[in-house]
Amino acid sequence: MKVHYLPGQAHYFSERNDRENSRVALLGNELFLRNLSTPPDVGHFIRALNRLLGERHKKEINIYLEGDFSIYANIIVPVASILSKLKRQGYVINIIDKTSNIAEIQFTNPVNVSDVNIENFPNLFQRIWRFSNGKEIQRFIDSTIHAIGQSCANKGF
């Protein structure tokens, strides 16, 4: 992936806080995510977001997703959850998605379990899901077990 460097006043978040190793960068009220593929990247995202929220009184955040994201649930779900919470607090989150694969997982708008017929939902495992209560969690677990069973049956296990 070709790295897009920002002007000198940008802040980079990585183990060394340098632009060559950084997957998270901040410039004004714009947050640049080049990839989030390791657990420390979530921490870098949170540090950058805290800095942004601490410096700005605006309720609008622009987030640029760049590169070919590797999607791992233990990384992408906490980020989606944080953004969802900020939206509920009145922040306007603008996602400028320049990736090839983030939109299909409902990153910016997790699917609420209560809003769909989850038992018949296509690509159950390629979405981010939102739960509101224990009943929805149980429904999701039951649907997941059913989907795994169907997958195994279709493959002859």
Image (cartoon, helix red, strand yellow):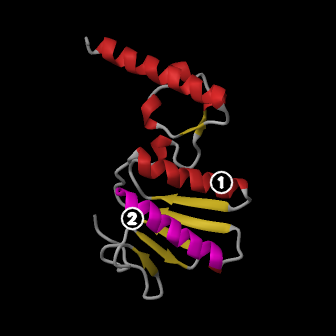
Q: Is residue 65 left or right of residue 84?
A: left
The residue at the point 47 percent across, 42 percent down is 105
The residue at the point 43 percent across, 52 percent down is 75
Quadrant placement of the N terminus: bottom left
Q: Which residue is mark 2?
A: 34
Q: Main secondary structure of the magenta part?
A: helix
The disc labelled 1 sits on which kind of residue? Answer: Lys
Is residue 90 shown above or below 22? above
Q: Which residue is mark 1?
A: 85
Identify which residue, 38 or 12, lies in the foreground.
Answer: 38
Residue 149 in the image: state x and y as whole percent.
38, 15
The answer to whether residue 32 of the structure is visible from this angle is: yes
Q: Secondary structure at mark 1?
A: helix
Magenta span: 35-54
The disc labelled 2 sits on which kind of residue? Answer: Arg
Image quadrant assignment for residue 41:
bottom left
Q: Is residue 133 left or right of residue 50?
A: right
Q: Earlier in the sequence, mark 2 or mark 1?
A: 2
